Image: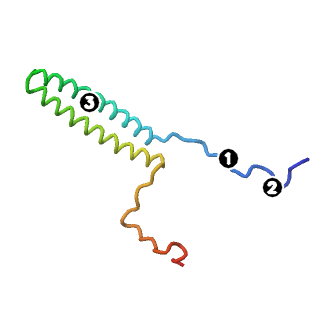
């Protein structure tokens, strides 16, 4: 039985070749760097806090505070970069801007 004919063949077109998303790769590297820096700063803050509680002076308390602030900043920047990465990969769309016209109340049928 032959299935040939003028419309025989695949219904789908050929898939376009996948390309490397360089912005997503750069964002992934930046996220990795932020997470590693965050981990190091948390470890340093714990170490400085232990030294400060043992009575090694006032400088350990200030170093612990600086390490805590740095860890907070790294985590915040890392989360912002995760949001940008998701947008670059097309996982989440940005919210509609204020310049966009308002949607009709009744939907498409009411707009006719």
For the residues carrying marks 3 and 1, which lies nearer the camera in this image? 3
Cα–Cα span, label 3 and label 1? 50 Å
Lower position in the chain sequence, tag 2 or tag 1: 2
Say which residue appears at 18% left-offset and 23% top-offset.
50
The residue beneath circle 2 is: 7
Lower position in the chain sequence, tag 3 or tag 2: 2
Q: Which of 55 and 43 is in front in this view?
A: 55
Residue 96: percent from left, percent from top: 41, 61
The residue beneath circle 3 is: 42
Colouring convention used in this rendered image of the protein: rainbow
Cα–Cα span, label 2 and label 1? 16 Å
Vertical order, 38 against 79 (above or below)? above
The residue sitting at the left extreme is: 57
Q: Is residue 112 left or right of residue 97?
A: right
Instruction: Say which mark, if any, is on residue 92.
Output: none
The residue beneath circle 1 is: 14
Q: Is mark 3 on a helix, strand or loop?
A: helix
Vertical order, 19 against 49 (above or below)? below
Vertical order, 11 against 98 (above or below)? above
């Amino acid at each position: 039985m032959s299935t040939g004919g003028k419309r025989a063949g695949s219904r789908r077109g050929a898939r376009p070749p996948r390309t490397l998303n360089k912005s997503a790769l750069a964002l992934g590297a930046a996220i990795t760097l932020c997470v590693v820096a965050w981990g190091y700063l948390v470890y340093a803050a714990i170490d400085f806090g232990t030294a400060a509680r043992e009575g090694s002076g006032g400088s350990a308390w200030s170093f612990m505070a600086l390490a805590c602030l740095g860890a907070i900043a790294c985590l915040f920047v890392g989360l912002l970069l995760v949001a940008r990465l998701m947008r670059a990969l097309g996982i989440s769309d940005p919210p509609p801007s204020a310049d966009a016209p308002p949607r009709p109340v009744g939907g498409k049928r009411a707009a006719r």
